[in-house]
Image (tube, helix red, strand yellow):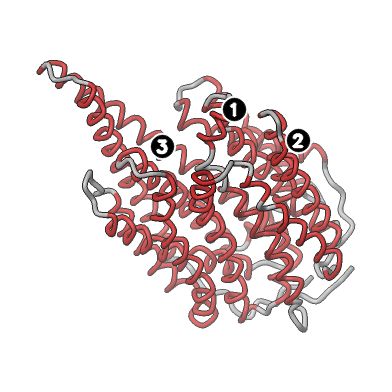
Amino acid sequence: MQTEQVMKKPPYLMIVILFVGAFVAFLNNTLLNVALPSMMVDLGVDYTTIQWLANGYMLVSGILIPASAFFITRYNTRPLFIVSTIIFTLGTLLAALAPVFGVLLAGRMLQAVGAAFMGPLLMNVMLISFPVEKRGAAMGIFGLVMIAAPAIGPTLSGYIVEHYHWRVLFTMILPFAIISILFSIWKLENVLPTRKVTLDYFSLVLSTIGFGGLLYGFSTAGEKGWTDPIVITTMIIGIIGVILFVLRQLKLESPVLDMGVFKSPMYALAAIISAVLSMAMMGGMILTPAYVQSVRGIEPFVSGLMMLPGALVMAFMSPVTGKIFDKIGPKPLAIIGLSIMVITTFMLSHLNMDSSYMYIIGVFSVRSLGIALVMMPIATNGLNSLNAKLYPHGTAANNTIQQIAGSIGTAVLVAIMSSKSTSVGESLAADAAAKGTLTEDVIKTIESQALLEGIQLSFLVATFIALVALILSLFLKRVVNQKAKA
């Protein structure tokens, strides 16, 4: 099947259908984070076990996203989206009815299998539906889904857990998933170009070992520590797996993930900036709730509400940023956005025990503005530099890099926080013990102070990570009049 790079008329109804599916998938990704403590008690499992509902979902997604390029290239849009949505819906139903933890985990894994293809499918349809000069605005709408849905998740989850049973988190998604299936059967068309490519199963094994090992290693390093034998072993296996995967792709005629995307300087630069930005962004999304809930003792729902203005800023600004990108290109937006992120992240490193609610909400919201200014414009500019047949590989590589970088950033910043908190806590406890004032109330105060200093240091490190992205953005160039050939 051959098609033009850009369709004469964008399939708006089809894009809306894909948007519903992608929104539900992205929302589902962070919906359980706040609910995990309640689920842990209800299901009678410990914290390490319940974390698999989040880590397992991320692992399956991280393993399948690199392979999404093959499936999008090989199979038509309509059946691929319908099958993905059905798998996601079955997983959601299984999780909603799960009598024990094992069944719930199986449901989450099925959700992840279906969700792994929804985002890449939508992004590829957007790329061929709009010309380069209008693509920024279109991808800005996609950014609204990609950024806002996960950001809204914790607030919505906090409200539901406080007022209803955690199973509502799954049952409320079911109607949207079913509607998405029905509309896709009714109106979805095959718009993406396909060609006969073969799946190299050994590459799939290497991808699973490599990306799965890295994601698991980094996601558990913050909890178990960098010196834990399991963490070290899985990370080494992951690195070896990724290296072998990349080397094999370079030799194959039909690679699962085409490394040719990195021959484009602007795509490669965009991928590096996105990775560095993801490290700082995802770490910040973990550190801020940790400060609000664990240091200040604010309830999960209220803490979720405090993060909501930031999510709304991102939701509102993402389409606006896309339109600005179409007019002026990525460099001015990236420099302004990353400058905002550097400044606000530095301000978060100065949080203290009595920082006002308005200060926390204001800084977090302005930081969200900075993220909205830079995230999608950089990704869009990088994808614009690619040949049309590389779009599936470009989106798959970009999503994989962001996911792994986000895990690395989270693990590094959480490890720094934990290490600093431990050393400060031991020092303060020793001083209090020497003075004979180590009471239960003092211990609680010491724990809060130690955690605060750990969070402050982690935000300071995140500031320097964001500064690296800002320096790299100075080398951005706008991709114009790209004549990609399908």
Identify the amino acid type marked 2: Val
* Residue 394 appearing in the image: no
Give coordinates of residue 486: x percent, y percent.
79, 70
Is residue 205 or residue 427 the one in the foreground?
427
Frontmost of labels 2 and 3 is 3
Give the class, few, some or many, for how many residues have Cα within 10 Å of label 3's Cα (few <14, many ≥20).
Answer: many
Identify the amino acid type marked 3: Val
Identify the amino acid type marked 1: Thr
Indicate which disc, 2 or 3, sits on the residue closer to the N terminus.
2
Which residue is found at the position 82% from the left and 57% from the top? 82
Is residue 311 or residue 233 the one in the foreground?
311
Give coordinates of residue 133: x percent, y percent.
61, 81
Quarter-wise, where is residue 431 in the image?
A: top left
Give coordinates of residue 287: x percent, y percent.
39, 44
Which residue is found at the position 84% from the left and 74% from the top? 3
Residue under numbered circle 1? 234
Q: How many discs appear?
A: 3
Residue under numbered circle 2? 205
Looking at the rendered structure, the secondary structure element under dot 1 is: helix
Which residue is found at the position 58% from the left and 24% from the top? 44
Question: Where 4 falls versus 260 (above or below)?
Answer: below
Separation (CA) of disc 2 from disc 1:
15 Å
- Dot label at residue 373: none
Looking at the rendered structure, the secondary structure element under dot 3 is: helix
Question: Where 78 falls versus 459 (above or below)?
Answer: below
In what quadrant of the picture does the N terminus appear?
A: bottom right
- Dot label at residue 414: 3
